[in-house]
Image (cartoon, rainbow, N blue to C red):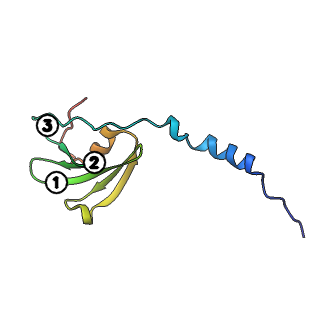
């Protein structure tokens, strides 16, 4: 029988720090500016940490802001929406739930 010593906490921390950026390295979040009036895809801030994304026809999803991460939920109702993506880029979050034919305006 071979007994192995567990790795030291210093080594485990070093490995983890290479894999994940520290909280200080993540971008700070400010509210996103509203979509232009002529945009096919629109988003509106409906809570301190939530956006509703819609087209001219209906709501297509929601974006929750959790720290520095945008959590993208697809669905017309928030209580039944399904998580489809987590990203640090708001434009990518909007594109993830935009209908295929709708174009998001460039920033």
- Do the CB atoms of the residues marked 3 and 1 lie less than 8 Å apart? no
State the separation of the CA atoms marked 2 and 3.
Answer: 23 Å
Q: Which mark is residue 22?
A: none
Q: Which residue is mark 1?
A: 59
Q: Residues within 10 Å of mark 3 (few under 14, many from 20)?
A: some
Q: Horizontal placement of 69 versus 2: left or right?
A: left
Q: Residues within 10 Å of mark 2 (few under 14, many from 20)?
A: few
Mark 1 or mark 2, whichever is nearer to me: 2
For the view shown, which residue lies furthest in the bottom direction? 1
Mark 2 or mark 3, whichever is nearer to me: 2
- Do the CB atoms of the residues marked 2 and 3 lie less than 8 Å apart? no
Q: Horizontal placement of 56 versus 66: left or right?
A: left
Q: Residue 9: percent from the left, percent from the top?
A: 73, 51
Q: The N terminus appears in which quarter of the rendering?
A: bottom right
Q: Nearer the viewer, residue 69 or 99?
A: 69
Q: Which residue is mark 3?
A: 39
SS for dot 1: strand
| Precedes in sequence: disc 1 or disc 2 | 2
Q: The C terminus appears in which quarter of the rendering?
A: top left
Q: Which residue is mark 2?
A: 48
């Amino acid at each position: 029988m071979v007994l192995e010593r567990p790795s030291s906490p210093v080594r485990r921390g070093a490995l983890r720090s290479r894999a994940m950026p520290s909280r200080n390295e993540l971008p700070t979040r400010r509210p996103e500016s509203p979509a232009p009036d002529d945009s096919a895809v629109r988003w509106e801030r409906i809570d301190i940490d939530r956006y509703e994304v819609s087209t001219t026809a209906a709501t297509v999803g929601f974006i929750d802001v959790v720290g520095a991460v945008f959590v993208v939920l697809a669905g017309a109702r928030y209580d039944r929406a399904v998580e489809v993506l987590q990203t640090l880029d708001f434009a990518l979050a909007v594109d993830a739930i935009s209908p295929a034919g709708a174009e998001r305006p460039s920033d």
